């Protein structure tokens, strides 16, 4: 499929296609390898939570900080 063909699709068709592609990529998680930096970040976050040093904010607070 080309960009020109995708551009002719309706928004709903493009979203359905994206969902189908995503479903096909995630149907077998063993085929999707997480990058090393992601594993390190998750381990760091877990350590912060377990040590009580993690800080949490609500979605509302997050949105207000980034607007």
Image (cartoon, rainbow, N blue to C red):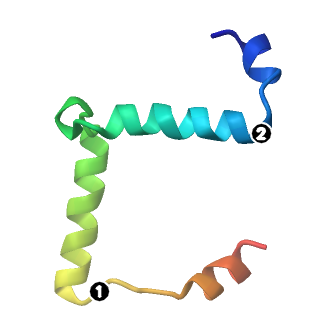
Q: Nearer the viewer, residue 20 or 3?
A: 20
Residue 34 lies in quadrant: top left
Q: Is residue 37 left or right of residue 21?
A: left
Q: Quadrant of the C terminus?
A: bottom right
Nearer mark to the viewer, of 2 and 1: 2
Question: Is the residue marked by circle 1 packed among few (<14), some (14-19), or many (20+) residues within 10 Å?
Answer: few
Q: Could you tell me residue 24's position as x and y percent?
A: 37, 32
Whichever of labels 2 and 1 marks the residue nearer the N terminus, that label is: 2
Q: Is residue 26 left or right of residue 43?
A: right
Which numbered dot is residue 12? none
What is the tally of numbered marks visible in this picture? Answer: 2
Camera-side residue: 9 or 28? 9
Q: Are marks 2 and 1 in contact (CB under 8 Å)?
A: no
Element under label 2? helix
What residue is drawn where x is 68% and y is 78%?
63
Q: Is disc 2 surrounded by few (<14), some (14 to 19) or many (20+) residues within 10 Å?
A: few
Label 1 secondary element: loop
Q: Is residue 10 above or below residue 57?
A: above
Percent of width and height locating residue 8 = 82, 21
Q: Residue at x 23, y 50 (%)?
A: 39
Looking at the image, is 24 positioned above or below residue 8? Answer: below
Q: Which residue is mark 2?
A: 11
Q: CA distance from mark 2 to mark 1?
A: 44 Å
- Residue at 63 percent of width and 87 percent of height: 61
Residue sitting nearer the eye, 18 or 50 = 18
Q: Which residue is mark 1?
A: 53
* Image spot of residue 50 (x, y percent): 17, 83
Q: Quadrant where the N terminus lies?
A: top right
Residue at image location 24% in from the left, 52% down from the top: 40
């Amino acid at each position: 499929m080309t960009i020109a063909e995708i551009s002719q699709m309706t928004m709903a068709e493009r979203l359905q296609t994206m969902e189908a592609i995503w479903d096909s990529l995630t149907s077998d998680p063993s085929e999707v390898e997480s990058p090393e930096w992601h594993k390190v970040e998750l381990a760091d976050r877990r350590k912060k939570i377990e040590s009580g040093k993690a800080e949490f904010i609500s979605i509302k607070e997050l949105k207000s900080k980034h607007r």
